[in-house]
Amino acid sequence: MSDSYNVPLKFRFSRPVLKAIFRGIFHLLGRVTITGKEHIPYGKRYVVAMNHVSIYDPPLIGSFWPEQLEIIGASDVFEKPVQGQVLKAYGVIPVHRGEYDRALFMKIIKVIQAGYPLLIAPEGGRSHVPAMKRAMPGVAYIIEQTRVPVIPVGLVGTTEDFWQRARGGGRPALEIRIGKPITLPEITAKGAEKHAARQHNADLVMRHLAGLLPEEYRGVYAESAILPA
C-alpha cells in the first residue's frame, strides 16, 4: 500500500471492537441476511455505493463488511452526543453536506489510491423514506480520479422506524444485497458537458443500485433500474 495515507493506529484498534459490538446489536435486534459476498474484490481498491435511508445504514454495512471500510459522514452528526462519539471513535471522514470541499476530495482520493475501500452514499444524505433520491455527481468525480470499480450495495429494512419495530422483539429483517462491480465510462468531455457526464455516471451507479432493491426503494430510478444479470 502507498504511504500517502495510512489508517491511524488508534482506529486500527477501535474499528474491530466497534464492528463486533454493532454486529451483536444488529443480530440481537434483527435478522441479518447478506447476499453477493462473492462480488467483493478482496484486497483491491474499490468504492462501495449504498442507498441511504436512515442512521442505521452505515453501521450495518460497516460492521458486516468483511474488510474495514473508510466511511464518509455528515459533519453535523459529529456534534450529536452518541452518534458523534461513535463516528469519532471509528475515524469517519467528516463532510459538509451541500458544499464543495476540495481538500476533502483530495483526502478521499488518497485513501482510495492507498488501497483502502471507501463507503459512500451517492445521494449525499439520508432520504428518510425508502425511495431513493437522485444522486449527486460527487461519486462520479471520485471514480473519474481513481478509476476504481464501484460495488453497489442495496440495504433493505433500515427504515427510520427500525428501532420501534425491533424493540418489541419482532426482530425485523435486515438485508445487505451486494451487486457485481461496475466500471464507469471514462469522461473526456469538457465544461458543462463534463458535469453532465459526471451526473450520467452517478445516475448509472444508482440505476444498478436500484436493480438490487425492492420497487418501493427505487424512487426516482424506478423506471431506469438495471436488474442484475
Image (tube, rainbow, N blue to C red):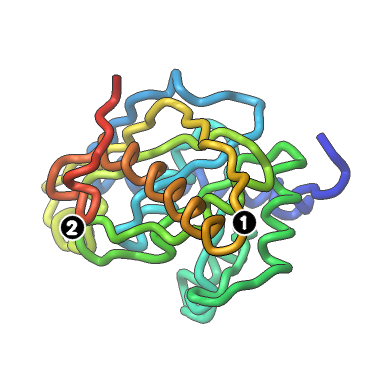
Residue assigned mark 1: 190
Label 1 sits on what residue type? Lys
Considering every residue shown, the one lying at the far right of the view is 3
Residue 95 circle label:
none
Q: Earlier in the sequence, mark 1 or mark 2?
A: 2
Q: Position of residue 218 (x, y in %)?
A: 21, 48
The foreground one among 105 and 70 is: 105
Task: Name above or below for residue 143 compared with residue 141.
Answer: above
Query: Residue 78's image quarter?
Result: bottom right
Q: Which residue is at 85% across, 48% downward? A: 4
In which quadrant will I find the C terminus? top left
Q: Which residue is at 60% across, 62% downward? A: 191
Residue assigned mark 2: 167
Label 2 sits on what residue type? Arg
Q: Position of residue 164 (x, y in %)?
A: 16, 62
SS of the residue at dot 1? loop
Q: Which of the two marks, 1 or 2, is nearer to us in this view?
A: 1
Q: Which residue is at 52% across, 57% downward? A: 193
Q: Are there few (<14), some (14-19), or many (20+) residues within 10 Å of tag 2? A: few
The foreground one among 118 and 63 is: 118
Q: Position of residue 110 (x, y in %)?
A: 75, 50
- Relative horizontal placement of residue 216, taking residue 206 as reference (left or right): left
